[in-house]
Amino acid sequence: MPRFSVIVPAFRVQAYLHACLDSVLSQSFKDYEIIVVDDCSPDACGPIADEYARRDPRVTALHLPDNAGLGPARNAGLERASGDYLLFLDGDDTLLPEALQTIADRLGATGDPDVLMYDYARTYWSGRSVRNVLADRLAERGPDTFRLADRPELLQLLMVVWNKAYRRAFVEAEGFTFPPGYYEDTPWTYPVLMSAGSIAVLDAVCVSYRQRRRGNILSTTSEKHFDIFQQYDRVFAFVDARPELAVWRPVLFRRMLDHFAAVYASRDRLPHPSRAAFFRRATASCRRYRTPGASVPRRAQLRHGLMRLGARRTYRALAASRRIGDGLRRRGAALRAAVRGAALQAHYRVQLRLPLRARDAVFAADGGGAYAGSPAAIEAKARELVPAVRTAWICRPADAHTVPPAARALAPGSFAYWSALARSTYLVNDGAFDRRLVKRRGQIVLQTHRGTPLATIGTDLLDRPAAAGNTDFEQLLRSVDTWDFALSANPYSTLVRERAYPSAYTTLEYGDPRTDVYRRTGPADVVRLREVLGIPAGTTALLYAPTHRDYRRVQRPALDLEQLIRVLGSQFVILERAPRRAGRAAVGGGSGGRTRTSHPGIIDVTGHPSPEALALASDALITDYASLMFDYVNLDRPVVLHLGDIEAYEAARGTYFDITSFPPGVVARSQDELFDIFASDHWRGSRSAELRAAFRARFCPYDDGNAAERVVRRVFLGETDGLPLPAPARPEILQVRQDPAGARVGG
């Protein structure tokens, strides 16, 4: 008897069925059977099912003699199922990696409940994936198992069959089956949840719910949508046959009204001549099953009342007025924004005519993000060495709490923001200021950059459209022309950036201020950082920080972290810092994308404002092409590179040297190689230490903890002599060659 029976009905899904079945067969959890039900599909669904059945004994292909519909097809699968639990997966949807293992773990942890509810994400044809907006209803709080009465908010979730695992013995004892029709999920899901003696939830996305552009049954214009009335008849008949369930009638009545309204409001479901008849049927059902008592949002109360009364014309007028009102509100918001924008620019022009404030300095990092990076290190040192200086930090309101009390937080686009840009003497950023910035005589602009570049940057992206995106290179160069000083961490970076950002600025080859913190942080501080992040004592923390992929529209995980943590064991945790896209070809590059996991050994630190703090809290770094590797070697901790897509990355983005020939640690070209590296302890062996030392000597010659002080003394205090640099004064420069197309490679 397998743990799971995965039932897959198939009708006109030949383009997606391979991906559906592969998503099950590729799961690390193997104790399951797959029952593919070919609902007399006129396309190749039947042969595809037969092909998989021949290749894998866990797959059974059933062929219905006539097209019966989704409900009867699922019933055919139910009759053949032998697993402990029943899972349903539509033929155009897929399971996420490790979904079955995650479900199995949760079932075991909650004592095998009658029903386990898990989450899903809508996946669009473009590749965009959006998690269920009501995911908070699946929070794993309170008792492991409960009855529906304990958490009635679960009825607010999408009432579908495929986001749950059902104990087969429970389903058989209750005699649950699917009716025919379009809305067959409705008279299955409500009775199952109301009858279940024990329910558990899993706060993890397990199913990718494909949103097809065309061909989806529920988006097809047809009178078959009248089936919804018969399905709710079945739901209320079930409740009437069980008096103990009468308490659910008010909730079901409200959900029925919401469902009717949603179908009626959809422009692509009901044929226009049938809309009046649908409304009449909805009114009749409302009168038949009316059971007041459930709370209804104020916005829906009038709509529900009009539907009960059969006031279709008033209902239509109300809907039209709301559409008009929404449009007016949008246009009003746009007008207010335009007026405010004009007022801000007028204010800025006035401020530009007022004298500069000699003591004022404005700082920003990561496109207006949290207090972090080299600008933050320089701001702190400026307040220490230049007591008269008044500093301000540009950041979104959500990041204002990261700004020290001694610095003023400026919201981008505010009146105070434009005043500061117009009148501050010092402007410090690791990216670009607003393109409308007018640099004044006497203002000093310091560009700190974001670490040492491996990937192609600046004007070198002219021949790389995938990475450049919609970059305005003329605007980029106008921004570069405002720089007075540009910071460089090493001679290699100086060579690269003076070519990629050509202008007359002065390069300050002083080291990277954002790494100064590594020299000042003691063991006790590291312990506190690990406690704040939730790293268990005695475990080895691996920081996983990949970079953005320009050649992918949608950022997908390059590494299966859940499988890695299982290979590593309970003595390891992974700090997952998914790439964040800060800008396509702006100064210094960017990142992007987001993943989520529910594994207890994986800690999501994507939202943490300080990469430096994450580095200090970790014991080793796993990355690919991220500039963080150049900083991390200052800690003299192991670095492992996972470069499974290096050919694609170099083709799209380009790199200034071959990282595989001069890496900061051991290199894995595949996920299996990475697992072997950790299994053999090669990741922290002597060869790893040798590579790290050579990398540090070449790229971190000035990272002695005093880089920020050197910058402040030169830029803010005007000192040009006596700024000590650690030896060697001129370390070996890595060769940066230029290929015939103009991009610098190799070396």
Image (spheres, grey):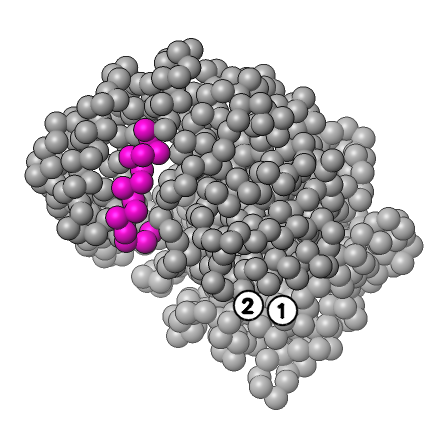
Q: Position of residue 190 (x, y in %)?
A: 43, 27
Measuring 29% from the left and 35% from the top, which residue is drawn there?
A: 229
Neighbours of disc 2 within 10 Å: few (<14), some (14-19), many (20+): some
Pick whichever, 341 or 227, lies toward us: 227
**Circle on res. 687:** none
Q: Position of residue 285 (x, y in %)?
A: 23, 28
**Circle on res. 649:** 1
Does the residue at mark 1 contact the one at mark 2 (Cβ under 8 Å)? yes
Taking the magenta stretch, the answer to whether it contains residue 225 is: yes
- The numbered mark, 1 or 2, whose residue comes first in the sequence reads 2
The residue where tag 2 is placed is: 551
Measuring 46% from the left and 21% from the top, which residue is drawn there?
A: 194
Q: Which residues are magenta?
A: 219-233
Q: Position of residue 281 (x, y in %)?
A: 20, 35
Disc 1 element? helix
User: Quick check: 699 left or right of 290?
Assistant: right
Q: Quadrant of residue 294?
A: top left
Neighbours of disc 1 within 10 Å: few (<14), some (14-19), many (20+): many
Kindly tell me whether residue 411 is visible in this rendering.
yes
Taking the magenta stretch, the answer to whether it contains residue 700 is: no
Q: Residue furthest top?
A: 244
Q: Position of residue 302 (x, y in %)?
A: 16, 28
Q: Main secondary structure of the magenta part?
A: helix
Q: Residue furthest bottom?
A: 740
Amino acid carrying label 1: it is Tyr
Amino acid carrying label 2: it is Tyr
Kindly tell me whether residue 400 is visible in this rendering.
no
Measuring 49% from the left and 64% from the top, which residue is drawn there?
A: 43
